[in-house]
Image (cartoon, rainbow, N blue to C red):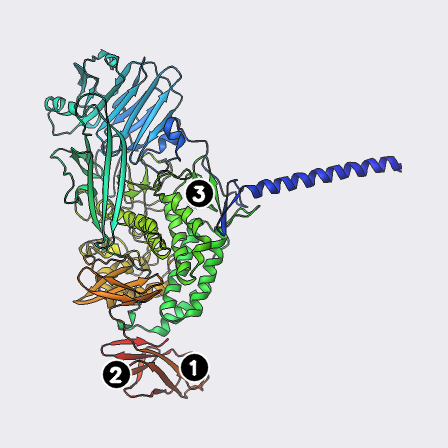
Amino acid sequence: MKTGTQELYRMRHLMRIYLFVFIAIAGLSADIDSQIVGVGAGSYTTQFPGTDAAGRNGYPSGIPYLSGQAATKPVPTNDWWSNLIKEAHGGQAFNYPLSYRSYSRGVAVNYTMPFASGFSEYRAPMDGVYDGIIVGVENLNASSSTASDHSDWSATINWNDGAHDFSALMGHGMPFTYFIKGDTDVARIEIGYNEAGAYVDGNKVIIEDNYRGASYIAYGPSGSTWTKSNNVFTSTLNGQNYWSLVMVPHEMDIADAITFFEEYAYVFPTETRVAWNYDESTSIVTTEYIISPTIMEGADTTVFWGILPHHWGNLASGSAQPDTLSYNTVRGELKVLKSNTFSTELRFSGILPTLPNLGKYSSGFDPAELYDIVKRLKSLGLAEWTDSYNQGQEMNLLIQTARVADQIGYIEARNEILETVKERLEDWLTAEAGEVAFLFYYNDDWDALIGYPAGHRQDVNLNDHHFHWGYFIHAAAFLEQYQKGWANQWGEMINMLIRDAANPSRTDDMFPFLRNYSPYAGHSWANGFATEPFGNDQESTSESMQFNSALIHWGTITGNDSIRDLGIFLYTNEHASVNEYWFDQNNRTFQPEYGYEMVARIWGGGYDNGTWWTTDVAASYGIQLYPIHGGSLYLGHNTDYVQEAWNGMSTNTDVLSNVPNDNLWYDTYWKFLSFLDADEALSLYNNYRERNIKFGTSDAQTYHWLHSMVALGQVSEEITADYPIAAAFSNEGQMTYAAHNYGSDTITVHFSDGYNLVVPTFSRATSRDIEASIKIEASDSVAAVGGSITLTAEVSGTVSKVEFYSNGILIATDETAPYSAIAESLEAGFPGFYANAYEGDGFNLSS
């Protein structure tokens, strides 16, 4: 039996424990709450929330290898050289025409080209056996290299072991590599391939027939000399600390090259910068590429570099033009430019939220059938066990369905979907203490916003942020379209997603400039750290283009011209690069032996037609087209290419055989074909309605899209508008002009061929709209089998006739008011009644 004193001690001890636990828990809660940062109505956390029940959720390991100025800037992941900041000695950095790898003694420089092309690939890693040239300083033994500075498409990598210091400056499209050493260090060049081909010529080291037949010249400062010992050349650089190395074009004589390149050898590209301008009146995007040089010696001021096909194929009329010299690269011909700036001009032909509601002009279009498809999809909901990528696809399925529902007047379905998407998107945009799913975490080691649960290593490797966030931003634009003011509460969280993947600011201290988009390459990179031996990569250009189009929608609907113009810049430039490097529409980048009309993946070191999950070529086609939506009109700009690609798709897959295959995305294929031959695409759809529909695809959108394209014909990409959410189509001479006004004022959209389209506030319009509207009512809600029902039509406006339909079959025509018809011999079930009110050749459907 306990004494009173013992019991009192026990109680006091327990109270201390309880008090401690309460204080600790309260403190922990306060700490967690303090890590949640409010952004409008949303929020994100700066504390890793932990893993979920399946052990998912993570973030990149380690910290970036940065120093100098680079350490004061947000971390530049997803770039061509980003492996160098993830690994102590990274590599896999392909700049066209060279490739780079870090060692403790300096940087390896190679000319990396595939030895041969196969039927389905043309790619090569940086050789693991031969390092053509290794440049550094004597006795250097750095435990790691670091990025000490970087600009839009160039980077300076530094090696410092405490006693020795060495830096290499490299840039996209630059045959030169530029070096700086410590004041007391001795420059060192090690020949790793064909030592006999290297020799000294005054202040130069001549390196002939190096790896893959490349020749180089290393230029020391004036008056410097080099000493050769076995395969190593060293120099004190005549008391200076700079030198450079250039790869010589294969067709150039080495003696001529020695003299030719000397004027460029001491002009270092200190900063590279891209700038863009969208002229709304002409719908032309001008992109300027600028290099700011530092002159190490001499009077010359021009940097020697080159431009790729998507550059030289679209040069502005007043731009500097390329020289006759060129280099062969995996991206095609790199043409030499003797100028520190050049500019391109690209036409923006417009996008839409979805196709206009003109399927009614397509034979076989049945609004009752479309209504039933929407009805089946409207209550699908969104999965609770998912990830950021799959959730985005699910939301897109619902959004595309809702857009169709809105057009056919099925407002109940639209609103139900709207609330479903809104609830889940707002959940994602709000971080709460203790949750491990549907939230965003800002990692300040890597300056990245990570969504949990993540898909496709979006978290641990920072992969695919533009793919995933494109779905979310598109969903946000959809919500703002139908719930005005939503962006006032949630818009800044959406803008954070944009800043994470495509930040237009170089002074933002949270996110790097244009993380995913590579300004010089003209397209995005998907891999956060270029972890694969072939360098960085991008697979799904169509999802990258969806991100770009989502920015255009979001910027336009929120009145943020900066985001709108950013989206148009990305859209037009990436479109040009897709045409060159994924589609080879100009027949100047694919090797002759390559057997397909498009590639599935672009790598820094080449391209191939495999996907990340299968070798089935059906998926290789689909991944470059999915998802098709109102921002996908670029796919229909070149119908000759659509024909070429469709021929390959028909030959290399079972798309014409109606064979079940989860890698063959029939809906995507048909919608792509509709840009060329919508009637055939619709016929294929009607002959295989029972197909397996790809995850994330809306059958309602497919039905609506194909019938609409039958009426629209083909995209008239040569016609532009002075408003971005607009497009023109031509069907055997019949033009259709379409636009969607996101604003609160009526606008007139001026098309470049002279047509003007008035678009009311918050509305869509086409040149084929009529004033008349119609709705029908039935005399009874229930009728006996074999019985009849009287249908009456209420019409506004002047009409010439009203047609009444039952299940797509015309049952009566009435040319005088009041308009009515009798539906007889009714069968069991739910007949789909509708009516058309005609105004000349145009008509509107009843809702």
Report which residue position mark 2 lands on: 800
Q: Is mark 1 on a helix, strand or loop?
A: loop
Q: Is mark 2 on a helix, strand or loop?
A: loop
Label 1 is placed on what type of residue?
Ala
Residue 617: give x, y in percent of width and height.
29, 49
| 490 relative to 319, above or below | below
Report which residue position mark 3 lands on: 449
Camera-side mark, 1 or 3 = 3
Quarter occupied by the N terminus: top right
Image position of 698 (left or right of 590): right
Task: Measure the alpha-carbon separation of dots 1 and 3.
Answer: 56 Å
Front-lying residue, 513 or 664: 513
Nearest to N terminus: mark 1 or mark 2: 2
Residue 113: give x, y in percent of width and height.
23, 33
Nearest to N terminus: mark 3 or mark 2: 3
Mark yes or no: residue 707 visible. no
| 210 relative to 671, above or below | above
Q: Residue at x 43, y 36 (%)?
A: 446
Crowd rating for badge 1 (residues with CA inside 10 Å; few <14, some 14–19, many 20+): few
| 830 relative to 510, above or below | below
Crowd rating for badge 2 (residues with CA inside 10 Å; few <14, some 14–19, many 20+): some
Q: Is mark 3 on a helix, strand or loop?
A: strand
Report which residue position mark 1 lands on: 828
Front-lying residue, 265 or 565: 565
